[in-house]
Amino acid sequence: MSKVDVLLGLQWGDEGKGKIVDVLTPKYDIIARFQGGPNAGHTLEFDGIKHVLHTIPSGIFRKDTLNIVGNGVVIDPVIFQREIENLAKFNLPIKETLLISNKAHLILPTHRLLDAASEQAKGKSKIGSTLKGIGPTYMDKTGRNGIRVGDIFTSTFKEKYDNLVAKHKGMLDHYEGFEYNVEELEPAFFEGIDLLKSLTTIDSEHYINQAMREGKTILAEGAQGTLLDIDFGSYPFVTSSNTITAGTCTGLGVPPTKIGDVIGIFKAYCTRVGSGPFPTELFDEVGEEIRRAGGEFGATTGRPRRCGWIDLPALKYAIMINGASELSMMKSDVLDEFKEIKVCTHYIIDGKKVDYLPFDITDIEIEPVYKSFKGWNTDTTKLTSFADAPKELKEYVTYLEKELEVPIATVSVGPDRSQTLNNRK
């Protein structure tokens, strides 16, 4: 019986998970998304074309691989339809290679309206929601009001929909000055529902466990990042799902004893979208230079990302709670032009030096302690072997491996799937 390997982000999302899933996909029979919704933007680049996926797993471009949208995912039928339509030109056998869990929850137009109304009401204390309706959908899921993919095939679907929309309208009426029109959003929603009905839906927990019994290789693809986890992230500036390894078990129906390798993805520096704490954030021209060199704008929202140096206390925390067994360092080429590169090794909190992430990270003053490294000042984007990498880049990787106590198996030097260096010793 095979195990399920897990690939997830160790920072605040946007680490480059989509690219590594695409690179690893030939090793796997099945790629499965286990949480999150279309607030994810997984960017893949190959043959000179850039692709951004929001709900569909990043293995979709490999025709011999099955892709499963698991029960822990929330699906917006409108965005999902757009994704399917964008893939049409590639002549992919979507009906055969894309399977959707009957237990995945649906994002209704009123969920998006509730998200927008809630953020607007928060004023200056906004969480930085992507306004995709994710939070309200997960609230209905845990409040036992949600509508699932399997419901669309039942005779009571429209009744369930109408009841939930009526409840949402009652909630929206409490937001003073918030104007909305549900009716104009509904045609696109029901068109998306019709498309969903035409696709292949499954009881994914049975399917995945049977696939393991048959010895199939499976990779679970995480969305967002560890520091956005609803339980372990920088609460309340987090997403609404469990983005960590444990989320694979609840988001796919995989027993904890069947988790295999855990591949943690991180950037050679750090970014964050939206509000919330970010100890190593740079507000100077260095932060601006990282943003420019890295093209640090959200794949889903286009928002400029906040940029800073790599944060080891946060990374060690993420590695600990995920049980990461190997690492991939992304976007190291973004630092190609820097003469000096810094690493946050500790925090100073109330005059004390600590190397862990405290409970109240959102409310306390944190002063990062940095160690400086000499930059490699070389174009690394054309490298085909890590053995040929500049000495300074090798030293940077070796230092991080020693501090994090987990091997960095791959180093990415560009967005294309070919720009991925193997560092397996």
Image (spheres, grey):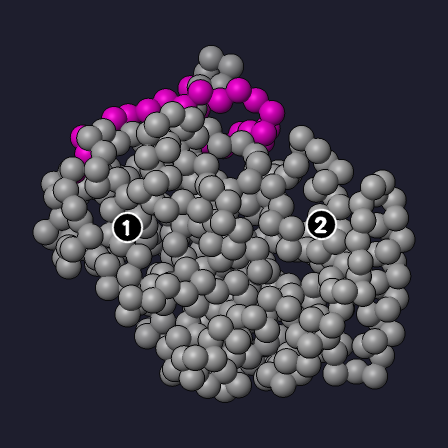
- Amino acid carrying mark 2 in the image: Asp
Residue 264 in the image: above or below residue 256:
above
In the picture, measured across the screen, residue 18 lies left or right of residue 169, that is left
At which x and y percent is residue 418? 24, 64
Q: Is residue 9 visible?
A: yes
Residue 355 in the image: above or below residue 78:
above
User: Does the magenta-highlighted stretch encompass residue 128?
Assistant: no
Q: Is residue 23 visible?
A: no
Which residue is disc 2 drawn over? Answer: 115
Q: Residue at x 55, y 45 (%)?
A: 228
Q: Magenta segment, which residues?
A: 353-376
Point out the image quarter for the C terminus.
Answer: bottom left
Q: Residue at x 49, y 32 (%)?
A: 278
Which residue is disc 1 drawn over? Answer: 408
**Total of numbered circles in the picture?**
2
Which secondary structure, mark 2?
A: helix
